[in-house]
Amino acid sequence: MDNLETATLAAGCFWCVEAVFDDLRGVEDVFSGFSGGHTDNPTYEQVCSERTGHAEVVQIKFNPAELSFADLLRVFFTVHDPTQLNRQGNDIGSSYRSGIFYHSDEQRRVAEEVIAEINAEGIYAGPIVTEVTAFDKFWLAENYHQEYFANNPNQPYCAAVVAPKVAKFRQKYVSRLKK
């Protein structure tokens, strides 16, 4: 599909984020991986060591005729806490940071506008600390990380952390779910 755009987003554990965006209408595909670091083709273990500079990210292929980048970001900001620096819940370190790796000047502009909008609305007690950085490279995570929640819903982390985030997303965005 030539009409698809790409978004690369970091919001803590990629298992959580992938599971949410898999259900969003307008999203064609979601891949778990790494961006924002200085090591080529890092492994999950290397990224978790906090020595590569990468964040766990999802790369999303979406149809902008069905889902705008701004609306995609509005969902992104509701499925994690963008006020926590270098962590999400018990996942701590720069690999779990909140980030938007923009693919164009237009994406950068929209990201900055949506952040300003959310800060102005006072939704969060503190300011959004999500980094907005030019996209450089995306490294696909190992195969077992792809569709992790769908394949492992009873795994303890998935049951305790991922499932509640997915349920909250589905409840809030029921009208935007894939059929």
Image (tube, grey):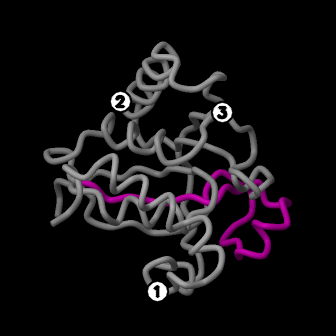
Question: On the image, which quarter does residue 133 sit in?
Answer: top right
The residue tagged 2 is 106
Q: Are marks 2 and 1 in contact (CB under 8 Å)?
A: no
Q: Is residue 123 left or right of residue 161?
A: left
Label 1 neighbourhood size at 10 Å, few (<14), some (14-19), many (20+)?
Answer: few
Query: Could you tell me how many numbered marks the image carries?
Result: 3
The residue tagged 3 is 83
Q: Which three-letter amino acid code belongs to the residue tagged 2? A: Glu
The residue tagged 1 is 151
Measure how far apart labels 2 and 1 are at the Cα level. 35 Å
Mark closer to the observer (2, 3) = 3
Q: Which three-letter amino acid code belongs to the residue tagged 1? A: Asn
Highlighted range, magenta: 35-62
Identity of the residue drawn at 74% across and 48% down: 87
User: Going by the picture, which residue comes out furthest to the top?
Assistant: 120
Q: Is residue 157 left or right of residue 118?
A: right
Q: Is residue 148 magenta?
A: no
Dot 1 or dot 3: first in sequence order is 3
